[in-house]
Image (cartoon, rainbow, N blue to C red):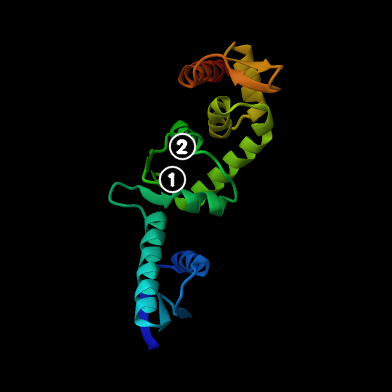
Amino acid sequence: MRAKRVITIHVRDDREKEEFMKELQRLRLPAFIYVHGKLDSLKINVQGTKDEIKEAISKIREIQNRVRAKLYPDRRGLYHYSVDDLLREAGTSVSTPILLKALQLLGERAELRDGELITSMPWEEAVEFVSQLGEALSEIALQTTRQIREVVVPVSVAFGISPKEVIETLVELGLAEWKEDKFKYELVKNKEQALEELLKALKGDADED
């Protein structure tokens, strides 16, 4: 038996409305949905069987919570993003160790919990930042191992240095080398040690300037 239910979603501004509609369009629902936008709300007409309507409304509420978590900070001033949402919006793929380390190097708070990134960086900035990480990664992906990328890419974007320059600095410091048999650069020391020594050297250069 077909049924119909209308729910109203209240939004604070156009930004929330746009993000909500974007998420809603990505959703594949068994129920038929018609949305009528007003100034500070969206009226959503849901049609289908009772079960279809129940499932659709539950997913619509999930979207609303997710959109609010990424657009508005919690009591600690932190935003909550699905990592998958962030990568999709930025149109790139970056590993979570690279993402977390890059945010920390910028002085942002960042932690990962069950596929959710909790950070002090606002959504639009985070999307742009991840896009830059993706560009830096694509520049060196073919000639580097995973370990060295996890040092080079965060440092490159956080400090505004080209990834190739970061690799050159690592080689000069004796922290990385070119492996002829693999056609790749790789770290000579472990990742944490290499990063620590690289940051020390970069800070020394900055102090001299």
Q: Which mark is residue 83?
A: none
User: Spatial distance from mark 2 to mark 1, Cα to Cα?
Assistant: 8 Å
Q: Residues within 10 Å of mark 1 (few under 14, many from 20)?
A: many
What amino acid is at disc 2? Answer: Leu
Residue at (57% x, 34% y) in the render: 157
| Mark 2, residue position | 103
Residue pictured at 37% horizontal, 87% vertical? 3
Residue 124 at x, y = what percent?
Answer: 50, 52
Are circles 2 and 1 on residues that touch, CB within 8 Å? yes
**Residue 178 shown left or right of residue 188 in the figure:** right
Q: Residue at x 44, y 80 (%)?
A: 38
Pick the residue in front: 29 or 107: 29
Q: Residue 11: in sight, yes or no?
A: no
Query: Which residue is disc 1 drawn over?
Result: 121
Residue farthest along the front direction in this orientation: 1
* Secondary structure type for disc 1: loop
Rendered view: 140 above or below 186: below
Tell me which corner region of the image, top left, top right, bottom left or bottom right, holds residue 187: top right
